[in-house]
Image: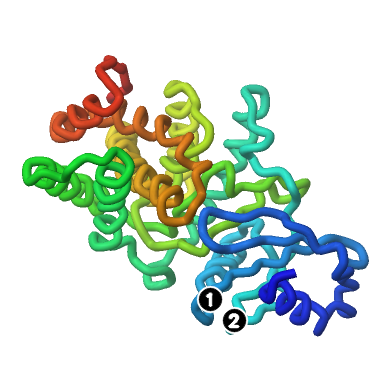
Amino acid sequence: MTERQMRLKDWLSGFSDRYGLKLDTMRTASADAGFRSYFRIDGKETTYIVMDSPGEADNIAPFIHADEVFAQAGLNVPKIYEENRELGLMLISDLGTKTYLDVLDHDNADRLMGQATDALVKLQAASKPDVFPAYSAELLRSELELFPQWFVKRHLGMEITPELRSMFDRTFALIIAKNLDQANVYVHRDFMPRNLMLTEKGNPGVIDFQDAVYGPVSYDIACLCRDAFISWEETQTLDWTIRYWEKARKAGVPVPSDFGRFWEDVEWMAIQRHLKVLGIFTRLNYRDGKPKYLGDTPRFLNYVKATSRRFDALRPLSRFIDTIIGEQEQVGYTF
């Protein structure tokens, strides 16, 4: 047992009687792309999740804050029973063992994705400024820079020539301007099937929201429909996006009144996320020793290729992507 695990058990023992915790049942529940670890532990009548977030003191504060805001909006999020901000430890409710990613198929996808967009609309309808950090131009750019830094230079071994750097600068400026031109709402920032739990009541359970911001209204629906780990036909994602847009309008969420405009917003937002994720997944491999995410990078290259070909302003990026994955015409939807 590591020193960290011993400290964790010592912390749990301080209130184990209150919840009937059986310390010898603690086992790994999951680990995420960051440095957090999750353990499942049996209690008297139910199971609990122990979240271990090592690092700087009070690094669980964003999770605690977002958990409260999301719960007030009516989302099914973990209940926090105990917390130690100095140690980065929490005892929270267990939302189950199955994520959307585990169970989604063509038979249940419409129902589950409908429930997911119901939850998303609830969250967005509750939005207020100054509750979460702004998804600023600086943050958007820092995320985009992960692509040339980690994917292009580190993974592909390509030199960032002055010409290539100029192309990235022009392209990123366009993407950021388009993103910032949208109305702002609460943004989960990783609202995808892997972070949605299949629950008996209040489906879905929502997790991994500690990076929430106040930003573009199209971000989370783009994230949900163009997932990092599962792909759908574009006709299907278009249908889900239209259904979400209709619900959002009825709920007063500030989506454009014209769906064609909103679909374009989704496309430009998706480009930003896909470039960011390509950088993050390669950084996870080379910096953090987590190679499993590299296997999903072709999905994102194809996302970027398909979307960038639809906009003249993104043609330089499209040509660059073609040099990586080759020429293949793709058809997309415009309105």
Q: Nearer the viewer, residue 252 or 211?
A: 211
Q: Give above or below for 236 relative to 139.
A: above
- For the point 65% across and 75% down, which residue is it? 89
Image coordinates for residue 222, horizontal then vertical, percent = 41, 40
- For the point 64% across and 26% down, which residue is it? 105
Q: CA distance from mark 2 to mark 1?
A: 7 Å
The answer to whether residue 11 shows anywhere in this view is yes
Q: Nearer the viewer, residue 282 or 212?
A: 282
Mark 2 falls on what kind of element? Answer: loop
Q: Give above or below for 237 relative to 102.
A: above
Image coordinates for residue 287, horizontal then vertical, percent = 42, 55
Pointer 2 and pointer 1: residues touching (CB < 8 Å)? yes
Residue density around tag 1, few if under 14, some if 14–19, many if 20 or more, within 10 Å: some
Identify residue for label 1: 61
In which quadrant will I find the C terminus?
Answer: top left
Q: Nearer the viewer, residue 109 or 90?
A: 90
Horizontally, residue 127 falls left or right of residue 215, namely: right
Image coordinates for residue 50, horizontal then vertical, percent = 71, 67
Q: What is the quadrant of residue 82 in the picture? A: bottom right
The answer to whether residue 257 shows anywhere in this view is no
The kind of residue tagged 1 is: Ala
Mark 1 falls on what kind of element? Answer: helix
- For the point 12% across and 41% down, which residue is it? 164
Q: Mark 2 or mark 1: which comes first in sequence?
A: 1
Horizontally, residue 212 falls left or right of residue 115, namely: left
- For the point 42% across and 23% down, which residue is it? 234
Identify residue for label 2: 85
In which quadrant will I find the N terminus?
Answer: bottom right
